[in-house]
Image (spheres, grey):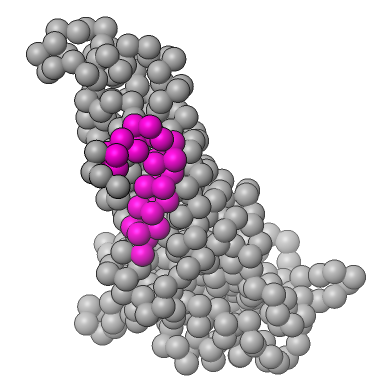
Amino acid sequence: MSWKKLAKIPIQHPLAFGIGVSTFKTSASDLLVQVVVEQKKEIDWKRNAAFATFGCFYLGGVQYAIYVPLFSRIFPNAAKFAAKPIREKVKDVKGIGALCGQVFLDQFVHHPLLYFPVFYGTRELVMSDKPDLWRMLQTYRKNMSEDLAALWKVWVPSTFINFAFMPMWARIPWVAGTSLLWTCILSAMRGGDVTHSEDIEAPFPTGSTLTLVKEGLDEVFASPVDLDKSLAHVCISGSGPDRIGHVAKMARIVADSGGSVTHSKMIRLGQEFVTLMHVGIDPENRGELIENLRSSQDLKALKIRASSLTRRQTGSFDDRTVGLKIHVVGPDRPGMLATVAELLAHRRMSVEDITTEIRMGEKGRRDFVVNVEVVTSQKMDQENLDSLLAEVSRIRI
């Protein structure tokens, strides 16, 4: 087949050409990220299938329908404007207006309302064993600002060039060319998120979720002791016979002393009321706060104890690179917390926060619930994450 015949294929068969290029390009971009950027030992073919599916049906098919037939009807002179020399384009006010209109509809209507929802939906359907479209929408809502900012940096300039200079048949190939770069960015940003919070089916735990946090660790796992360096930090604890008004009295004394409660846990256990709280306060008022709590006749039964908290010193601990939020639920039985904690310790994960509770499950069954926030200085790639999920799912008591 001669070069001239090959060159006519995009013009004679624009839809098929666009679908073929988009499918190949999208799959190749994700493979490039997995092999070169993430340096995976094994290719995640399910993830790659999600990108290839999205490239085939949406980038090749749906976008062709939007950019060529639909935009040709909305902006009937778009093809003529694209064919004009630059000197004539500059003088064509209506054509420039139509160009801006196409860019606006594409970047500020099409992509936010259709492109990204379809992308997240395709990824959820292909990669997740239990697709949850509501969870998909929540994920997109959380990522929207970051996704659109990244999108516009690449696509607004490219879209202006596309609609200003490319003939109709070349619009999808141009999009595919730019998308080679964009898909690499999208794959790196959103390629593996689905498996970070996937339900596990196993005899125990009956339900587990794990969320991976790579950015903003200081905000997500923030300790007020480390954040508020100008304040004194006090841990207040106590226990005694349960009585109405304990919480109100303690909170009032803290507030009147100029303190601020951050983390706290107060609970009735049988006839006992137990409290634990962190208070940040001006160093000059620390002594007054402790004295007011201890001297209160209303709180005397709680046997209030107070101790100072100090920040960790830089260099005394490894830098945190990954944070994990783990949720485990299973039939209540002895040793469950110990087993989960031993697993985390074995993997050199530092507990930032851990809570447990008993709740009533199906048919009156008592379920034990563990919520843990941990951080680690170790690299947590997809392989290590999958291994951790597998270990949690194999827990037996």
Viewer-proximal residue among 25 and 353: 25
Viewer-proximal residue among 11 and 108: 11
Determine whether, in the image, residue 27 is placed left or right of residue 114. left
Determine whether, in the image, residue 131 is placed left or right of residue 372. right
Magenta segment's dominant SS is helix
Q: Is residue 196 above or below residue 57?
A: below
Q: Is residue 260 visible?
A: no
Q: Is residue 22 above or below residue 301?
A: above
Residue 4 position, x and y percent, is: 24, 38
Determine whether, in the image, residue 28 is placed left or right of residue 73. left
Q: Is residue 390 visible?
A: yes
Residue 73 position, x and y percent, is: 44, 15
Question: Which residue is located at x 47 percent, y 92 percent?
Answer: 346
Quarter of image, res 218: bottom left
Q: Is 217 within the magenta?
A: no
Residue 227 position, x and y percent, is: 32, 63
Position of the C terminus by quadrant: bottom right
Question: Which residue is located at x 40 percent, y 58 percent?
Answer: 27
Question: Which residue is located at x 45 percent, y 88 percent?
Answer: 347
Q: Is residue 329 above or below residue 80?
A: below
Viewer-proximal residue among 124 and 311: 124
Q: Which residues are magenta?
A: 5-31
Furthest residue toward front: 1
Quarter of image, res 237: bottom right
Residue 143 position, x and y percent, is: 43, 48
Determine whether, in the image, residue 381 is placed left or right of residue 1. right
Question: Which residue is located at x 51 percent, y 44 percent?
Answer: 57
Furthest residue toward right: 363
Number of labels in the image equals 0
